[in-house]
Amino acid sequence: MKTSLISALVLSAAVAAGAASAQSDREVGKNPYAGLHWSVVAPQGASWALECGFTPVTIRGIHMNRINHTGSGRMAGRLPGDNGRCKVTKTGGEGPVGLAVVKDGEAKAAGTNGGAPAIVNVF
């Protein structure tokens, strides 16, 4: 039941939000975050750490292949490309933490209550 609740919460957040080498010649230009949507939800306010890896890109002259965020509650954003692997780890507080990544209008979601991190791969 908890897994289905987490999946439902993550999918709802995803709809609302709409590891490689660090070297790349792919400059993503003026809109570096026009790729996949990601969303983290923690409806009871739990804190979490998010790490997303993606195909290496160059953003304003800086080579990168991952982003990291920490927070509590809800946060959403975008990756610079159309593929990625995101992992969210619950770091404290009450309740579950859910993660969704959307590609081509389809959300892939996972959740955690603590223990193991939630991982979503979209390639």
Image: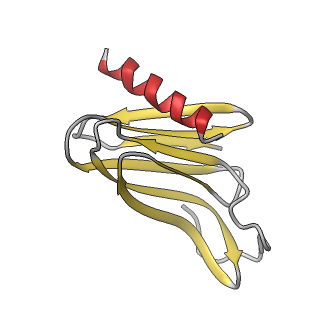
The residue that appears at 70% across and 57% down in the rendered structure is: 81
Image side of residue 4 versus residue 82, left or right: left
Residue that protrudes farthest toward the top in the picture: 1
Q: Quarter of the image containing the N terminus?
A: top left
Residue that protrudes farthest toward the bottom in the picture: 61
Q: Where on the picture, by quarter, is residue 29? A: bottom right
Q: Is 84 in front, or is 46?
A: 46
Residue 86, given in percent of the width and then of the height, sits at 49, 49
The residue that appears at 65% across and 44% down in the rendered structure is: 123
Image side of residue 19 versus residue 90, left or right: right
Residue 100, given in percent of the width and then of the height, sits at 52, 38
Residue 52, given in percent of the width and then of the height, sits at 50, 56
Residue 98, given in percent of the width and then of the height, sits at 40, 37
Q: How many marks?
A: 0
Q: Where on the picture, by quarter, is residue 77? A: bottom right
Q: How is the image coloured?
A: secondary structure
Image: 36 above or below 33: above
Q: Is 76 in front, or is 103?
A: 76
The residue that appears at 66% across and 48% down in the rendered structure is: 36
Image side of residue 115 versus residue 35, left or right: left
The residue that appears at 43% across and 62% down in the rendered structure is: 69
Image: 24 above or below 110: below
Image side of residue 19 versus residue 62, left or right: left
